[in-house]
Each structure stands twice: as structure tokens, then as C-alpha cells.
Amino acid sequence: MRSRRQLSTLEPINANAAGVDIGSQTHWVCVPGDRVTDNVRSFGCFTADLYALASWLEQCGIQTVAMESTGVYWIPLFQILETRGFEVKLVNAHHVKTLPGRKSDVLDCQWLQQLHSYGLLSASFRPEDQICVLRSYIRQRDNLVRSACVHIQRMQKALTEMNLQLHQVVSDMTGTTGLAIIRAIVAGEHDPQTLATLRHPRSRRSATEIAQALQGDYRQEHLFILQQELALYEAYQVQLSACDTQIEQCLSNFDVTSEIALPVAGSPRRRPQDNQPAFDLQTHLQRISGVDFTQIDGMGALTVQTILSEVGLDASRFPTVKHFTSWLGLCPGSCITGAKVKNSRTRRVVNRAANAFRMAAVAAGKTRSALGAFYRRLRARLGPPKAITATAHKLARIFYRLWSSGRSYVDPGINYYEQRYHEQIIKGLQKKAKAMGFALVATPSTQIVS
């Protein structure tokens, strides 16, 4: 077995550190050389092997373990080691790349152990276990919503192939009117006048318009496809409802941070809109976090749920707001060489919370608020992509301030950022005029009225 030669005589900071190279079938583990004769061992991926790995680390007097984030193979071992009392650090594989040369699993685990013993590895963020449970449910819910959307598109395709322009006369094919008509078509009803009578009384289109859109070529093969896609869509809705039940139960088990009464079971509820769950999600989120984040423009209950499930409830995990926005990948980069900024682009990261902030930024840009004015001004000057990132960055900073302080959000008004922008322009002009020996004087016709 090939061993890595020790190239440094520095005193280790973490004397009781081990390194684990994660694999799909085998995990290679390295402990300090003074603990056992054979300090590098391999263990299988079965549960019994993982418990044997943890027992061997205990026998070697290990207290902290570093492992790479390889796919999802690290999760079972991480949870077992954490349960056994080890301090486990999950590190980014990009940050622990070894020097050029021959690469093997044996050398990788030794390299991890050496770096960790010198305190050169920083752990990736992972919320507490209770949040991880909630996060699993919410990610599964997102997968169900995406899968259901695929079948909606296929239903629309089958209808279009029969020249049934249902999507032209209803705003939502899965709404009350749309589903009633599709179910009737699948059941064998093809008379446009009869189908038009299934419209909701509050529908914007008349029965005559809907009947005209439903005159088409009802072909058997397309009706068969429509029937199957409708059945699959409804099956996903059943699973989505079951997932919402698990999420509500999980949220109810959290400790109460804000004294807000939960809705009484069996009380009348509004029909959920836009994939909203059937229970009062906003009340649950405010109860466990102590803050009503939905007061921020553009942030709905589902957006807040996604963010809290990714970042947790403990704001102290991020020392400052700069650490938080940097982890999200929303802050400007700092590529500086020779005292010159070469690149200030944001880092490319895969982060569900950052994506939620970007979606909230798009929604906030449509509101008549300070954030909406901020987004529209940047969009006119820099274009939509940069405006979305900048607004998402500002939303993340506002979120962190409320998250860490527990205060409420107050919208400063639509003219707030416009007034600040004009003040900055005037301040810059005054500075330039003073440098050239002039004085900038405002006349009544040029004064800005706030």
C-alpha cells in the first residue's frame, strides 16, 4: 500500500483528526500514524461496516473527522459518526484538491487527514438535524411539483393536437374550470356546448367563447394520452397532499419562538393557490422563526419555507451578513491582483436558497415598493440578469437583518431609492464642481421634490 510521505514537521492543531475518502462501495480511512501500525484501512458501505468504522475510530482516540462531499454517499456515514459523538466536517472537494500527480483513494484519505490535522479545512454549512428532516420533505415536495408540471404540459399538448384551445380561454388548465372540462372530455363528453356549461360562474370568458375553443378533432389516440396524463397528474396531487401532511406535522414539532395561535383543525380554509399547501404555512413559519418574512416584498410563504429549510433557524451560524451573502453566492466577487480588480462577478454556486431569493427578486420587481423601484432602475441600466442578482442580494441582506434581530420589515416607500439615487448624483456633481473651483447652486426649477 502506497503511503503519503510527511512533508512538514509542523505541530498539528487537531491531533485526534482522521480523514475519510468516501466511495460508492468502499470508504478509505486514515488516522494518525502513532495510533496503530496500519493507520489506513478500508471499510465497506453496508451499515455494519459503517458502525465498525466508527468503533475503530473510537479505539484510535479520534475526536474529529473530515470527509469529502461525494454525491449522497457521505450522508449515512456522516449521520452515524455524528450520532456517536464525533465532530464531523464535510468539506468541499474543490477545496482539498491534492497536488498534481498520481491520485488514489488511499492518498486522498491521507491528504484529508493531514490537512485537517493542521486546521486547514473549513466545514461546509449543514443545518441542525431537525431542519434537515424538514428540508428532505420540502425537496421531495418540489420534485413532486416539477413532475406534475410535466404532465400538465403533456395534457396541453394532447389538447392542442386535437385543436382544443382550452389554454386560450382559461388562465389555468388545472383550475376549477380547466380540470372539470378535461375530466368531462376523458369521460366521453365531446359536445362543446355541454362542456362550456362546466365553466366556473366567476370565469372571465363566456360560455360561447369556451364552446368555440372546444370545437376540435377528437382523435382516439390523443384522448388516450390525455386520459393517462390526467391520471398521472391526479396521482401526483395525491402524493403532494400526503407530503404536505408530513410537512405540517414536522413544523408542528418545532419549538415555539413566537406565540402565535395555530388554526383550529377543521376550520374553513381558502383553496390553495399556485401550489400552496392546504394548511396555514405562513403561521407555522412565523411561529418557529419569530419573524414574518412574508412582509418583505416578493417573498411568499413557499419562498420563505424553502429558504428556512436550507439555512435553518440559527442566524449565528453565519457571523455577519457578508458571510451569509457569500455562502449564497449573491455578493460580488473579489478577484484582485496587483491592487487592481480583475473580476467582480458573483461565484457560480448551486444553492436552493439563492434561487429562492432570485425568484423573490423577480416578484419584488413587479411591486410598487422600494425594492421594486430599486430593481427597475437597475434593470434599465444593467439589464435583467444583473438587476435580479443585485435585488436578490439586497433581499438576502434584509432577510439576514430580520433573521438575526427578530424585527419586522417596514417598506421605506417607492420613492426611497429614487431619492437616494438623485442625492448621490447631486453629491457627485458637487464634488466635481468643487475640485474645479466652482460651486453648484440649485435653482427652484431644478430642485428635487421628494
Image (tube, helix red, strand yellow):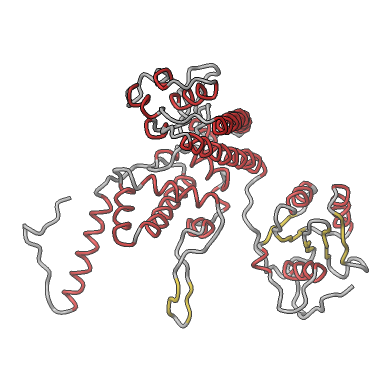
Question: Image quarter for residue 36?
Answer: bottom right
Q: Report whether 269 appears left or right of 2.
A: left
Q: Report whether 193 appears left or right of 188.
A: left
Q: Is residue 274 above or below residue 376?
A: above
- Taking the view exactly as shown, the residue that stands out farthest to the right is 37
How many numbered callouts? 0
Q: Is residue 149 visible?
A: yes
Question: Image quarter for residue 349?
Answer: bottom right
Q: Residue at x 26, y 50 (%)?
A: 416
Q: Residue at x 63, y 38 (%)?
A: 137
Q: Is residue 83 above or below residue 282?
A: below
- Taking the view exactly as shown, the residue that stands out farthest to the left is 444
Q: Which of the two residues, 255 or 89, is positioned nearer the viewer here? A: 89
Q: Position of residue 138 (x, y in %)?
A: 59, 39
Q: Position of residue 365 (x, y in %)?
A: 34, 48
Q: Is residue 244 visible?
A: no
The N terminus lies in quadrant: bottom right
Q: Position of residue 113 (x, y in %)?
A: 77, 67
Q: Residue at x 82, y 79 (%)?
A: 5
Q: Which of the two residues, 423 or 300, is positioned nearer the viewer here? A: 300
Q: Which of the two residues, 173 or 221, is positioned nearer the viewer here? A: 221
Question: Image quarter for residue 187?
Answer: top right
Q: Report whether 230 appears left or right of 6.
A: left
Q: Position of residue 77 (x, y in %)?
A: 78, 51
- Taking the view exactly as shown, the residue that stands out farthest to the bottom is 338
